[in-house]
Amino acid sequence: MEDLMDMTTVSFTKDVLDKLEPTNKRYSIADTKIPYLKLFVYESGAKSFVLTRKVKGRSQKIKIGNYDTLKIEQARKKAKDLNALIDLGGNPHQDRIDERQSITFKELYEHYYSQHALRFTKHPRSNRKIMEFHVLPSLGHEKASAITSKQMRDLHSRIGEKVSKYSKNNENKKSHGNANRVLSVVNAVFNFGIKEELIDCKNPCFGLKKYKSNSRDRFLSPAELIKFFEALNHENQLFSDLFKILLFTGARKTNVLSMKWTDIDLDLKRWRIPESQTKNKDVNIVVLPDLAIAILKVRYILNEKADLKSQFVFPGEGKHGYLNDPKKSFYRIKKFMGVDDITIHDLRRTMASYMAISGASLPMIGKALNHKSQVSTAIYARLSQAPVLDAVNVATSLMNNGYR
């Protein structure tokens, strides 16, 4: 077969274009059907449809779109329309400059949300709610290219100085987290717009400093644990077992929800989480304490009795076959406990915190949580002072009583 990279023209098909590999320099091939339409293949592996022709006597490269987001027929139609415009004396390059200057921030955000956020970011819908509440009312109708760093700095400060709705007992907790999140999303929106050539301006978020974030170390106290287990008695056993496994293993919620029987060895008391499902992309072997083993054995029997022929420990009607995010159940648990400042992830912190309280070393805690570095584990270091303090109290008491 003829080497595609040596060809200068070819009839564009998905099969042909998919086979084009990057080299140590950019190259392009032209379509045989639409004049001036080319596909550029870059060193990075990215591919773009580009119209290359003279406009008013000057050679221009007009980007039509990225290969991974634009179908061939869509690219051909756009190229055909651009050719017609140029033949009539138009200047797409100048039109694009004008368009980039006129696009509003809301329009830019909608492009970002539909083309990027929904596909490639973790929390697109919750981020959208934050944008709709904090940003779009004040900046949505402004031209994106006209938004300044001062506007973003002022917005960041204004959000950050608001008292959080989770403040209790007049502690006036600030909304620094929301302010930082807004800054991150707006920064991503502008980076997307610049990369996709939707806007022609500097990113107004560049160089702005976020509020310093304190490592969250919320965990359940002994009294709260009693209430927590009482609350679980009022929940469906499937949810009750789920939360107990979260607590007793210290594993991440997404891993526990997607836990498979084939990854569990009840005899060796181990649970193997594949690298594709771990945050640091390494295989994680979770040791299963006796309490977790007992729950899993009961769970296996219950699943069999219900004739649930599922590969998952916690089967459900979600699109992946396992239980959906148990937010509603956890909300009921918090309401029963009389607290509103705990999260499901705090169950993981509770496991780590009680390990620290019992005197476990930071490397041991890090191993249990599958933290790649001790930086993440270090937030529990302050908690490990409790056993040290106990030891010091015993020692000073002995010295005081024995040498008076």
Image (tube, grey):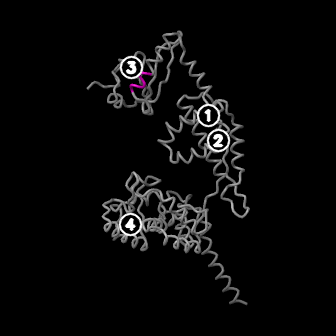
Question: Which comes before the other along the chain, label 4 or label 1?
Answer: 1
- In three-dimensional space, the C-alpha distance between marks 1 and 3, rounded to whole angstroms, equals 35 Å
User: Does the image show residue 324?
Assistant: yes
Kindly check if marks 2 and 1 are in contact, taking CB atoms under 8 A apart as contact.
yes
Type of amino acid under label 4? Arg
- In three-dimensional space, the C-alpha distance between marks 4 and 2, rounded to whole angstroms, equals 47 Å
Res. 105 mark: 1
Residue named by callout 3: 30
Element at label 1: helix
Where does residue 103 sit, x and y in percent of width and height? 60, 28
Element at label 2: loop
Question: Which comes before the other along the chain, label 4 or label 3?
Answer: 3
Observer-nearest of 243 and 289? 243
Type of amino acid under label 2? Val
Type of amino acid under label 1? Phe
Residue named by callout 2: 135
Q: Is residue 297 left or right of residue 218?
A: left
Res. 161 mark: none
Where does residue 179 sit, x and y in percent of width and height? 65, 47
Q: In this view, does 184 lie to the left or right of 253?
A: right
Question: Which comes before the other along the chain, label 4 or label 2?
Answer: 2
Element at label 4: strand
**Over which residues does the magenta segment extend?**
72-77
In the rendered image of this protein, does residue 83 appear above or below residue 106?
Answer: above
| Residue plotted at (68% across, 44% down) | 156
- In this figure, what is the number of numbered marks? 4
Where does residue 254 sit, x and y in percent of width and height? 45, 56
Q: Count residues near mark 3 (Cα–Cα under 10 Å), then give few for <14, some for 14-19, many for 20+.
A: many
Question: Which comes before the other along the chain, label 1 or label 3?
Answer: 3
Q: Count residues near mark 1 (Cα–Cα under 10 Å), then give few for <14, some for 14-19, many for 20+.
A: many
Residue named by callout 4: 270
